[in-house]
Amino acid sequence: MRDHWYTASAPGKFVILGEHSVVYGRPAIVLAADLRMTVAVRRSRWNTMNGERLDFRRQPHLRYLTRDLRHAVDVETHSDIPVGSGMGSSAALSAAMAMALAAMDGRHLTEEEVMLEAYGAEFYAQGNGSPMDASACVHGGGITVNMPEPRGRHLWDVSRGERHWSFSDLEVPEMTFVIGNTGIRAPTGPLVDRVHRYMERSRFACEVIDDIAELTVQGGRALMRGDKEELGRLMTRDHKLLSILGVSCDELNRLVNASLPYSYGAKLTGSGGGGCMVALTDRPEKVCQAIASRGGTPYVVRTGGAGARMELRPPTTAELRR
Ligand code: PMV
């Protein structure tokens, strides 16, 4: 019954501008990071994950992705992407797993088909988010969402009810970003719901979403011009607006404030409530020191990580369990 391994990997991502407002079809700018999730699958007699029995209640993404399988699977994962941290670990898992499962069945999926599988898994597992994470983790490099004047190649459109998202490829700029992880895990679904409830009862919250959308468009132009001063200023303003929406926290604010003296700008990235912040800087060592001195874990990210792809050989057990 057991088969050989089929292995795929996908990058994590970080949002430069536009998280939360993108859920309502507003613009966003996202870059893939050079941190990857690797997933290996093989046919098996029982469903297992990393050597333990696979509990689908704790892994709803995997329940969705394996919904049409007629046999059980062994799944092995290895990830450099911190979990529940706003860096797209669940979308990267879904993208790599969708690709590996298709290969196991002898099917080749287009990039758009992998994205739709990954978004379906995200939607099934955590509700009403956008296809932004899935798109970034599948395509890699950089992408823009719903930009009025995208410069890159059009990738795909996704609609859900009244909401529409149009994705384009973004030529990744030469810029240095430092990520700071608070170490606090915060699942995306409840934070998206919190913003939604706030918007339902407050016109003010809807205006904040409009403001984020507007500064994201300005940020897209600054990025194209390579204007780091302006982009950084907009990132810091975005952090303030996200704080007003109630998705920042003391730990994130501490890391953002510690980074600002050495950065063009800094903000939380992803859904917030913990997880990570990102700073745009020419002084990455200083920012890393500042983040570490406030109890965060810094990473200097190289932008433009490759998108989801099959790996030629299965990872060794040592690599998977590293
Ligand atoms: O925290 P993450 O990596 O799942 O990022 C979520 C980004 C949101 O805009 C908050 C939600 C979404 O689905 O777009």
Image: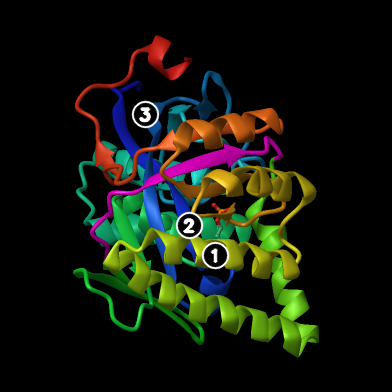
**Does 204 sit left or right of 286 as displayed?**
right
Residue at horizontal 63%, vertical 29%? 292
Real-space Cα distance between discs 3 and 1?
30 Å
Quarter containing ligand 1?
bottom right
What number is the disc on residue 311? Answer: none
What number is the disc on residue 19? Answer: 1
Please tell me which residue lies in front, 280 or 246.
280
Which residue position holds label 3?
A: 40
If you read the primary sequence from the N terminus, does the residue marked by circle 3 or circle 1 appear first?
1
Residue type indicated by callout 2: Val
Residue type indicated by callout 3: Ala
Residue at horizontal 43%, vertical 45%? 177
Position in image of residue 90 (x %, y %):
52, 45
Residue at horizontal 59%, vertical 47%? 261
**Does 201 sit left or right of 226 as displayed?**
right
Residue type indicated by callout 1: Glu
If you read the primary sequence from the N terminus, does the residue marked by circle 2 or circle 3 appear first?
2
Tell me if the residue at label 3 has its CB under 8 Å from ligand 1: no
Which residue position holds label 2?
A: 15
Proximity of marks 2 and 1: CB atoms separated by less than 8 Å: yes
The region drawn magenta spans 169-184
Position in image of residue 62 (x %, y %):
51, 43
Residue at horizontal 31%, vertical 56%? 142
10 Å neighbourhood of mark 2: few (<14), some, or many (≥20)? Answer: many
Is residue 170 on the magenta stretch? yes
Nearer to us: label 3 or label 1:
1
Tell me if the residue at label 2 has its CB under 8 Å from ligand 1: yes
Q: Determine if residue 66 is in view.
A: no
Where does the N terminus fall, quadrant-wise?
top left
Tell me if the residue at label 1 has its CB under 8 Å from ligand 1: yes
Position in image of residue 230 (x %, y %):
44, 67
